[in-house]
Image (spheres, helix red, strand yellow):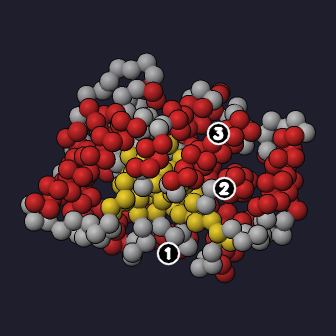
């Protein structure tokens, strides 16, 4: 099936009305990297770093991690890789970490909360990333940032480690970009200074959706009940886009929904210009975007809403079926 899309692997995801959407891929293993060339992704928009921690029975060492991250950067051949720091805790228990007995682990002591409270592992991971870069550009993204203060603290850890590495005589990255995942609704309401300070933001739709609708992403019974194409969620995304715009804060969407055709079209029609998805989705999403007109898609969405639809899904699906993909 992937062959069908080979013809435009190296062409941009440009819509009929001239918008260019950057398509990046999500990854988490060395084995994912060959897909970077194969899929035509512009970079790795989300590199989940949990796996290297989960597959071991003891904490990985800094040197091991640095070696792995360096191999990931080598394999990306100059395409950007966005490394997300450890998103762990509660339900994703490390075998060598004391289990926390929490009634609501998804809203518990996880991700950056652990990283800030017990910064040893976070700092080690940042050191590994800096060493792996060997002077090349580095992009670091923090998961599950809920408020500006957390981002400032996380960012200051990066600056401190950069300073430390430099003073130890190690080469430091020529350019460092520091960003946050927007996965909790609260972050969309952070002060302007947050949007000024963050080099980029990435909407973690898997988590954002669960907190927006208060529907556990692990619970089959409620998970499918709510639609990201519901106008309430789309309206929220528009607000996020509007918060970023005045500061030029780069915004992407890296939740699984970005790789679904109708969703990708809707997000682009709202104004998102960077999507990160499973490598296998890049071909189909590019095919669709190249044959779509975002202004028409937007009209279709608005019209359905004005007629009382709760979700844009049906109307966009009908528009899609008329396209020559
Ligand atoms: C997300 O929440 O959308 C996301 C990309 O992160 P994860 O799925 O790893 O929680
Ligand atoms: Mg998440």
Picture coordinates of residue 7, whole percent (x, y): 66, 81
How many C-alpha atoms fall within 10 Å of the one at disc 2: few (<14), some, or many (≥20)?
some
Q: Is residue 292 left or right of residue 241?
A: right
Q: Which residue is drawn at the image coordinates 45% and 27% (left, top)?
A: 107
Q: What residue would you read off at disc 1? A: 37
Q: Residue furthest left?
A: 168
Res. 58 image quadrant: top left
Mark 3 sits near ligand 1, with its Cβ under 8 Å away = no
Q: CA distance from mark 3 to mark 2?
A: 13 Å
Q: Is residue 6 above or below residue 200?
A: below
Q: Is residue 32 left or right of residue 216?
A: left
Decide if residue 111 is in sight here. no
Does the CB distance between marks 3 and 2 fall below 8 Å?
A: no
Q: Earlier in the sequence, mark 2 or mark 1?
A: 1
Going from N to C along the chain, the mark reached first, 1 or 3, is: 1
Measured in 3D between alpha carbons, the distance from the residue under mark 2 to the one under mark 1, in whole angstroms, is 27 Å
| SS label for mark 2 | loop
- Which residue is under mark 2? 271
Mark closer to the chain start, 3 or 2: 3
**Identity of the residue drawn at 69% across and 75% down:** 4
Which percent across, then down, holds residue 186?
51, 32
Residue position for label 3: 236
Q: Residue at x 19, y 41 (%)?
A: 120
Q: Is 24 displayed left or right of 223 in the figure?
A: left
Check residue 241 in the rendering and tell me which mark sits there, or answer none: none
Pointer 1: residues within 10 angstroms few (<14), some, or many (20+)? some
Instruction: Give how far across and how far down residue 320 sits, in percent.
Output: 82, 59
């Amino acid at each position: 099936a992937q062959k069908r899309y080979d013809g435009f692997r190296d062409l941009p995801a440009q819509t009929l009305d001239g918008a260019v959407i950057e398509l990046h891929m999500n990854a988490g293993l060395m084995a994912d990297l060959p897909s970077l060339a194969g899929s035509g992704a512009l970079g790795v928009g989300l590199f989940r770093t949990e796996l290297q921690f989960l597959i071991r029975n003891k904490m990985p060492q800094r040197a091991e991690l640095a070696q792995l991250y360096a191999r990931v950067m080598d394999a990306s051949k100059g395409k950007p890789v966005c490394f997300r720091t450890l998103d762990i805790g509660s339900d994703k228990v490390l075998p060598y970490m004391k289990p926390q007995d929490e009634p609501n682990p998804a809203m518990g002591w996880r991700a950056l909360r652990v990283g800030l409270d017990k910064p040893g592992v976070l700092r080690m991971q940042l050191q590994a990333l800096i060493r792996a870069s060997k002077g090349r550009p580095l992009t670091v993204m923090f998961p599950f940032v809920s408020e500006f203060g957390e981002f400032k603290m996380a960012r200051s850890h990066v600056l401190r480690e950069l300073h430390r590495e430099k003073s130890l005589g190690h080469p430091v990255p020529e350019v460092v970009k520091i960003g946050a995942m927007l996965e909790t609704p609260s972050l969309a309401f952070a002060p302007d200074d947050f949007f000024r300070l963050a080099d980029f933001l990435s909407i973690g739709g898997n988590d954002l959706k669960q907190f927006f609708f208060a529907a556990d992403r692990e619970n089959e019974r409620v998970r499918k009940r709510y639609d990201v194409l519901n106008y309430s969620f789309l309206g929220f995304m528009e607000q996020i886009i509007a918060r970023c715009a005045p500061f030029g804060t780069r915004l992407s969407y890296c939740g699984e929904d970005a790789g679904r055709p109708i969703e990708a079209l809707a997000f682009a029609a709202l104004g998102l210009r960077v999507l990160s998805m499973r490598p296998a989705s890049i071909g189909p999403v590019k095919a669709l975007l190249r044959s779509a007109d975002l202004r028409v898609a937007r009209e279709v969405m608005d019209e359905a809403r004005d007629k009382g639809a709760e979700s844009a899904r049906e109307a966009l699906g009908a528009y899609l079926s008329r396209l020559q993909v």
